[in-house]
Amino acid sequence: QVQLVESGGGLVQPGGSLRLSCAASGITFSAYTMGWYRQAPGKERELVAAITSGGSTNYADSVKGRFTISRDNARNTVYLQMNSLKPEDTAVYYCAAAPNVAGLNQGYWGQGTQVTVSS
């Protein structure tokens, strides 16, 4: 049984930072591409960042230079470090796993964690 469990969301002021974590079980974590998506109310779901099994990363233009995705294969965990947060980063953030980036939409998903950026 595959489980992806996100944590680390919360309320933060503009300009602040948060680190999201996603702990995976039931998959060969090191072999999977991991991604972070977000969805704000009334908006389409957006792929924020992804990291392949080999460590290659890609980011949405809206978060480049502010967000960093990383993985710890020993802990079966993927992280999203979010700095210089803006109100428009407010969304539910989801972790996803798949054999490759193209498969993330149809892959395994977590339950999501709320991030709210507000003063």
Image (cartoon, rainbow, N blue to C red):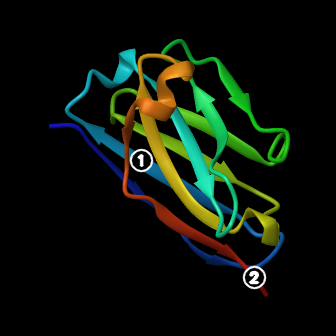
Q: Is residue 8 in view from this perspective?
A: no
Write down the quadrant of residue 108 in the picture: top left
Residue 14: x and y in percent read 81, 74
Residue 82: x and y in percent read 69, 54
> Which residue is labeled 2 in the image?
118
Write down the quadrant of residue 30 in the picture: top left
Residue drawn at (58%, 56%) of the image: 19
Mark 2 crowd level (few <14, some 14–19, many ≥20, 10 Å Cα): some
Furthest toward the top, the residue is 54
What secondary structure is marked by label 1? strand
Rounded to the nearest angstrom, the CA distance separating label 2 from label 1 is 23 Å
Residue 46: x and y in percent read 67, 46
Q: Is residue 106 above or below residue 62?
A: above
Residue drawn at (74%, 34%) of the image: 59
> Which residue is labeled 1 in the image?
22
Q: Is residue 16 above or below residue 53?
A: below
Residue kind at label 1, given as amino acid type: Cys
Residue kind at label 2, given as amino acid type: Ser
Residue drawn at (64%, 40%) of the image: 47
Q: Quadrant of the C terminus?
A: bottom right
Q: Is residue 22 in view from this perspective?
A: yes
What secondary structure is marked by label 2? loop
